[in-house]
Amino acid sequence: MLQSARRQFSRGFTLIEAMIVVAILGVLLAIALPSFAQMMAKKNTMSAAEAVLSAISLARSEAIRSNRNSYMVVDSGTAWCVGVARVNGTPSSPCSCQPGAATVCDLLNYTVADGKNTTLAKTGFDAIQFDPVRGFPLSKSATVLTSNQLITLTHQNDGQMQITITLNPVGRVKSCGKTAMTGFPACP
């Protein structure tokens, strides 16, 4: 009877065994953490780029669908945002995609969350109108664009996680990454 009591008692883990398991888990975590951080940086950058691409698509399709100009505004920096609004004619003052603004965009307001850690830079524009007939991008003053409009999204902690979105004067959108990512080929 004494031996059966000892057998039941010896079924647990010793302190040494528990410490070995914790040490192994620590080593595995130390190996996996950098690749997890890189994966999250890639996902955040891709998510931000998809939000901008979605805003461009919405603005263009809304202009064609409603047969009136639509408007896309982009604020750059670390607290960036993208907004889309319906517009009759040429807007005298653009809408704002920033929360709490007096004239908020009525179709879409996408404001980056602090956890995304992405920075948006734009080249050549503050806002773009879309023509209701063909969906061509126009300048804020409703003139035809003469050059490509660029939006570049970069992860703040990893400069290799960068996606560039190009909108050409006839409305074609092209996106590519500094390095190839799922859905975003490497830029030439």
Image (spheres, rainbow, N blue to C red):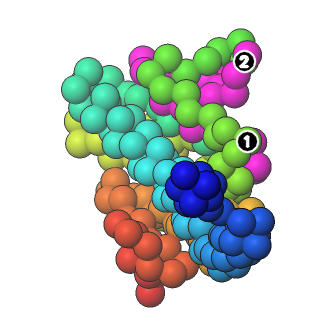
- Residue indicated by mark 1: 114
| Number of numbered discs visible in the structure rendering | 2
- Badge 1 marks a residue whose secondary structure is helix
Name which residue type carries label 2: Ala
Relative vertical location of residue 27 with respect to residue 147 in this rendering, above or below: below
At a point 50% along the width and 36% down the height, the residue shown is: 72
User: Is there any visible trace of residue 131 in the rendered image?
Assistant: no
Q: Say which of 27 and 182 sits in front.
A: 27
Other-residue count near label 1 (Cα within 10 Å), few / some / many at <14 / 14–19 / ≥20: few
Picture residue at 63% right of the left edge, 28% below the top: 97
Foreground: 98 or 5? 5
Residue 101's label in the rendered image is 2
From the viewer's perspective, is the residue at label 2 or at label 1 nearer?
Answer: 1
| Image vertical order of residue 113 relative to residue 179, above or below | above
Q: Residue furthest top?
A: 102
Q: Position of residue 27 (x, y in %)?
A: 70, 78
Q: Residue at x 34, y 54 (%)?
A: 171
Q: Is residue 86 visible?
A: yes
Q: Secondary structure at mark 2?
A: loop
